[in-house]
Image: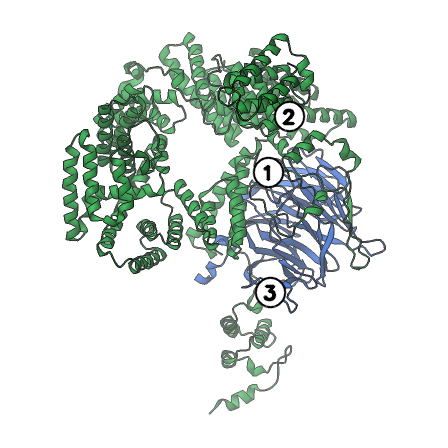
Chain colours: A blue, B green
Amino acid sequence: MSGAGLEKPQLITHVQQSLNYTVFECKWVPCSARLLCLGSVPRGTGVIQLYELQSGRLSLLREIEKAKPIKCGTFGATSLQQRYLATGDFGGNLNIWNLEAPEIPVYSVKGHKEIINSIDGVGGLGIGEGAPEIVTGSRDGTVKVWDPRQKDTPVANMEPVQGESKRDCWTVAFGNAYNQEERVVCAGYDNGDIKLFDLKNMSLRWETNIKNGVCSVEFDRKDINMNKLVATSLEGKFHVFDMRTQHPTKGFASISEKAHKSTMWQVRHLPQNRDIFITSGGAGSLHLWKYEYPAQRSKKDSEGVEMGVAGSVSLLQNVTLSTQPISSLDWSPDKRGLCVCSAFDQTVRVLIVTKLSKI
Amino acid sequence: MSDQPVSSLWDQGTTKTYQIPINHLDYKFIEKCSDVKHLEKILRILRSGEEGYYPDLTLFCEKRIECLAPGSRALRKDKPPASASDFTTEEWEKINDEMKSWVTEMKEVDYKIQFPVTETLHERLDNLPAVRGSNSCLHGGQNKENKQRKKKNIPRDYREWDKFDVEKECSKVDEVYEENNSKACFNISSNLPVIEKKIETTGMTKKERNFIASHEKEKGNEAFAIGDYKEAVTYYTRSISVLPTVAAYNNRAQAEIKLQNWHNAFQDCEKVLDLEPGNVKALMRRATVHKYLQNYQAAIEDLAKVLHVEPENAIAKKNLSDIEQKLKDLEPVSETHTKGKRILIQDIEESDGDEERGGNGEEHESGSGNKKTGVLLGGKIATKSEMGNVQKKFSSKGDGCKSETQKQSEYTESRVKKDISEKKTIEHLPDHEGEVNGYLNGKKKNESNDVKKETSSSHGTESSSAGKSISNLLPPTAAKLKSEGNELFKNGQFGEAVLRYSEAIENVINLGVQSRDDLSILYSNRAACYLKEGNCSDCIQDCNRALELHPFSLKPLLRRAMAYESMERYRQAYVDYKMVLQIDSGIQAANDSINRITRTLIDQDGPSWREKLPPIPVVPVSAQLHKWDGGSLTSETKRKKIADFNGDRQSEMNSEKMEENFRTLKDEGNEFVKKGKYKEALMKYNECMKLNSKECAIYTNRALCYLKLYQYEEAKQDCDHVLQIEDSVKAFYRRALAYKGLQNYQASVDDLSKVLIIDPNVAEAKRELQEITQLLNLKNDVGASSQQKQRKKIKIQEVNEGNEEERQTSTSEDAVLNYQVAKGGAENSLPLKISEKLLISEPSNAYEFGQIINAVNAKKDEAACADLLTIIDPKKLPMLLSNKLEGDTILIFMQALECHLLGKDPGLVYQHLLYLSKVERFTAVLTLLSKNEKEQVQQLFDSLSKKQNHQFSLEDLESLKRVYEL
């Protein structure tokens, strides 16, 4: 490797662990060196495995089996002291588990008629002001916001009007939770729709279509005045929206970049630097990106209305880990550059990304 | 012989895919071509191999593209992840080591985070904004006409009304508490993003604060990076509100500079320098601020400091020369002046070097020893530091030989003067100072500001003008000398410091000021200087004097111990260290030294080394530090207890040794528990048991280990053992957990209820009880429950454990919970009252208030009650008391008000009485008061009417009296 090459961040596979089931999501347990793998075992039940990173290997701490395959999970709405895991499963159930006592869920609701594809939380872990809330997006076309303090019914329900076709919601994300009132939910659908729901005003704030199914959306940070939104799509493109300036007709400025030859499964921003994010691709590849802001983030259009200006993205590094899609990825909130990803080759990998602090 | 035939030969067709002429696949063409798109196509063809395989050409093409467009997508190749071979050995090792240390660190943190699941967490959950307007529906269709936007203000549903607490809601309104319920906010919303400047941190653990603070700081950094300085300042402020850190202050200073808020930036720099003197970034930033405020002199000083630490700092150099240039431009008039200043700067540099070194050495060597000096110096205001510099100038004279001749002559001159003046006695001291200052004055007339101050203070007439808020009973001259001495000491100029201190001491003695404590401190400080100089005998003498004046004070003892140790008089040193530990068992240096000396003494004197020791004086309880809530006391008594046990069977010598062994083993065990290494801890405890099988604490601790290792049967046995001897809450609680693990839920419930009978305030027991009852029901319902229950880990028991260790090892950081202290009383025979001084902090809610009131009532501690009443706002009384008002509470309030507050603040007393009458159930409780009690109230009113002031009139009082039915 040349000297210049070493200045770039490198991705290293730190640990690799084969599993005997399909893993859909992997997550770090906040403030620990432990991680969770959520998935489905061949006999059709769900499984949660808790691993601990120990001197260069993953040791299984406990395995919990549940009735339905588990699709997704989040720690976003729990306190650092409790660290309860919220999961969505194939049966449309939202459950919150105390991992210390996982027999009975702390909270359980049959939230959707079909599989919950995506889940996100805010208001916990010191990230996001206001009440802890969980949002779920499901194949039944609805996006629902839940408050763990309210049983059985969602606090907000976003569904297509009667008579309209229901689209499969693939991804949801919270954002804009910079004070106790403001909060938005962004949802991506299989037809390429991206909708931004304002929870404060209970209104649809913005929508757009990126022509291909939206696999993953994420705000660069949930707990600041909306800054950037990245959406990845089925045919390997991703779009970065500058969310600071909304034009009444044009909406948010964006750039798109084609990186992977196949589906872009997920995007995750580095928790320690919002302008760096990683995308995972259908062909087992990971791309590390950096967003660069334009000199002026907004300008006046011909009528004198403020509109945003998109910046540019540059590729910092790319690697191919597997031949199978990498379905999920999670940065460690505690250690810069540490991340875990799971692929459909039934393997979970802990990766180290070097030199992130120098960018 | 030209290229022509060759090219024509090649000119035969195009490639299959892009129809590019074949002759474009050529070094020459590629070298000349600057059309990136075209080149990319060529590269693709070359890579595909459809026209043949040309690795060299491919590489060449790649390089060409990279040269033209480094960001081209065609250059992206599938790469495997980096591996060890991509790094140098050191880099690879560094990466792996970092991971390793992070993993170990996380494990410890992870363990710690588990235990503070306390009441406060639930309080915090209660403080959250209300649940969003329930079940609001939002239809997000593509068709805009069809869109139904629900913007209604949905009324509360019935369930919520059930829980509606009018009192609470009203008080919220009173506090202008922004109820951030989404429903309420539709109307008040404004377009401006409002970010709270403070983060509510009640009930957060240290780790959480850390996490949030760094998270907020990162947000600030990001905002800063894109030039949004206002937002950056907000986030830094938030970070600081959670946990003040040097980095956050420093970054905020930089952001404020960008916003040109010089004053704020300056204050932040000062904060940083307070927290971490010599912080280069802060100095740089302060210099910038000074520069813009045209305070060039100060800027130069700061930059000089920077340059001393980092001589190669280019920015500092540049700024310095800039400012010097400006200074010259500004003041071309006074040539001599600038010259004088020049010299000053250089001197500062030198003395700063000393400061750095001396400061470091100090920090290393005497750890906590010199907090006081640190505080004194830290508290100095900016103008004073200039004076300090002038002083420093003298002290650094010795090494000023490299200067020009002129300078040197100045030096010698002044030195002579000083030498003379030093010989003078105290009566002449003001003169001496005056002379020196006069000399300075002559040299730098223009710097009159600072010098004037100095002169005035040295004459002892207007001591305050020197900005000396150090505030002690010392006469101004002595105080000044002392602070100079401190400064010198900090700079590492111990000899000079000794002289200052000596002068101060003489001054104090001559004036006959009755301040033994201060004199003691002076001696103690001089002792520190002697110690640093290696003059141990003088150090010991001074320590002796200091201790005569103020027996059992920590620092002189510690210093004497060190001096003895370095003189190899280990026995005396041992005795002193022991005394230090009696006063404050938390001093690590003393603990270490004790161990070291013990070893040496055993080598020297053999097993009976203790016999040769001089007797160790017993430190009176009053001199011991109580900040550990009885921690030190407990360990004392424990040790005594153990000694008693062993004394029956073995000789005194042996028992002492055993006790030592026992203690270390136990401590090690506790340490292991803390780290989560239960097996190791178990082994240690087992060894402990061999030494002494009667100590209950060991059994309780071992039970915990067993619990953690899922060996419930053994855990149960240990608890049984303890419970045979005494009714320990902890043992009951742990047995309950063990029963739970053994799935004997009924027994578990029984034990938990016992815990709650003994102490109804153990929240975790309550919660555990709830959970187990639930499990019990589940078991009954389903019949067969899953086996995983056995592996249930319970966070809560660690709460207990943590606190226990605090008590045992007395290295606690967090406050010991009240009930723990109470429990401690059961275990220890020593009365804990002395140590258990009620710490009154402002209660934020009715629950906390209730806890404090209970504690106050239980002890009839009027003083504590008075403290409580002073810190709370009378207006909050109705909220805090809610419906918990009792006759006892009124009574103790009356007593506290009358005995403690009436003299100080009758207005406050009136306010309290007024708002007390507005408390729920007040009239009911009033009617229940006995005649005696009523008389007491009457008495209070009588005395209050005598103390009448402007805050309330007699009429007010009369009407209030009627409310009190008098």
Which residue, given by chain and number where applicable, does mark 2 sit on? Answer: B878
In front: label 1 or label 2: 2
Q: Earlier in the sequence, mark 1 or mark 3?
A: 1
Q: CA distance from mark 1 to mark 3?
A: 41 Å
Q: CA distance from mark 3 to mark 2?
A: 55 Å
Using the rendered image, report if marks 3 and 2 lie on a common chain. no
Where is residue B932? Give x, y as percent.
Answer: 60, 8
Q: Which residue type carries mark 2?
A: Pro
Please indicate, yes or no, whether residue B554 appears anywhere in the rendered image: yes
Q: Read off the chain for label 3.
A: A
Q: Looking at the image, do the residues carrying marks 3 and 2 touch, with CB atoms under 8 Å apart?
A: no
Q: Looking at the image, do the residues carrying marks 1 and 3 touch, with CB atoms under 8 Å apart?
A: no
Secondary element under disc 2, as helix, strand or loop, is: helix
Secondary element under disc 1, as helix, strand or loop, is: loop
Task: Establish if B326 lies above or below A83.
Answer: below
In front: label 3 or label 2: 2
Q: Which residue type carries mark 1?
A: Leu
Which residue, given by chain and number where applicable, does mark 1 sit on? Answer: A80
Which residue, given by chain and number where applicable, does mark 3 sit on? Answer: A299
Q: Read off the chain for label 2.
A: B
In front: label 1 or label 3: 3
Secondary element under disc 3, as helix, strand or loop, is: strand
- From the viewer's perspective, is B940 left or right of B467? right
**Mark 2 nearby-residue class (10 Å; few <14, some 14–19, many ≥20):** many
Q: Which residue occupies the foreground of this view, B301 or B689?
A: B301
Figure quadrant of the C terminus of chain B: top right
Q: Looking at the image, do the residues carrying marks 1 and 2 touch, with CB atoms under 8 Å apart?
A: no
Where is residue B836? Give x, y as percent.
Answer: 49, 19
Where is residue B910? Give x, y as percent.
Answer: 57, 22
**Mark 1 nearby-residue class (10 Å; few <14, some 14–19, many ≥20):** many
Q: Which residue occupies the foreground of this view, B526 or B683?
A: B526
